[in-house]
Structure formats: structure tokens, C-alpha cells
Image (tube, rainbow, N blue to C red):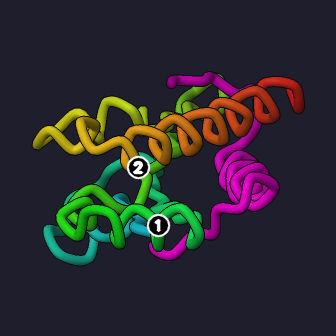
Amino acid sequence: MTLTLDRPFNGAVEDVIAALAEEGFGVISRIDLDKAFAEKLGEAFHRYTILGACNPKLAFQAVNARPDVGLLLPCNVTVEEVETGSIVRIVDAGQMMDMGDLSKTPEISELATDAGDRLSRVASRLQQER
């Protein structure tokens, strides 16, 4: 899912984190690529943040059903600064679970659907907050 938001970068990041929290996701990792590129490579890059979102209950159930699902956790959300505001991209949980035949495990398929529904509601909230 890709959304264009008419709000500044910092506000968009805060709004994404709040919308994720409303669906039971916490942000367990944050990578500010612009800062990492400047520090590690000496290269300038526009503001771009990767948020690793995790719903602990869903993650626990998924890893118990298939330990290899951990390779695809957490659900990533990116926030990118553009001239008109910010672009938010939210991973498709169902497509992620199609990798390695994970979705053929019924529990994983159900959890991917649940996570996908929750992430869709995150996107809807962000669009409504325009």
C-alpha cells in the first residue's frame, strides 16, 4: 500500500506510529536511512525512515506455528519525505507470507490475513487524517 500524505515528514512519522499502535503494532526498530547514509557513507539522502512494526500477539502465534516466519518479521513501513509532503508505504503481509510457501500453513495464512486487515485499517486512518 502506498499513500501520499499532505503533511511534513516528522508529523507523518508520528501519525504512522500512532495509527500502528491503534491496531496493536509497536515499532520495534527504526532506521533513518538519511542519517545512516550520511554517517556510514558520507552521502546525502532525503529523509527516509523504515519502521519495523510488530504486533506481539500475532508474531508469537506465527513463530510458534512456523519458526522460519521470523525471517519475514517485522512488518516494515517506510516514510519518505517528498516535496508535496510524505509518502508512506506499508508492506503487504499476505504477499510476504507467500514466500517460502508459508501461506500454505493454515495458521500462517489466517495470521497474514489478520495482519493485512490491521495494516489496511492503518492506511485508512492515515488517509482520513488528511
Where does the magenta region start and end? 1-29
79 vs 70: above or below: above
Please say whether residue 14 is one of the residues in the magenta stretch.
yes
Where does residue 80 sit, x and y in percent of width and height? 49, 41
| Image quarter of residue 32 | bottom left
What kind of element bears circle 2?
Answer: helix
Residue 15 vertical placement versus 88 (above, below): below
Residue beneath disc 1: 61
Q: Residue at x 37, y 68 (%)?
A: 35
Is residue 6 found left or right of 25 in the rendered image?
A: right
Residue 4, picture quadrant: top right
Q: Using the image as rendered, state which of residue 111 and residue 128 is in the foreground.
A: 111
Q: Amino acid at mark 1?
A: Gln
Disc 2 marks a residue whose amino acid type is: Glu
In front: 81, or 51? 51
Please, what secondary structure does the residue beneath circle 1 have?
helix
Residue at image location 53% in from the left, 45% down from the top = 79
Q: Quadrant of residue 38?
A: bottom left
Callout 1 touching callout 2 (CB < 8 Å)? yes
- Report the residue marked by disc 2: 107
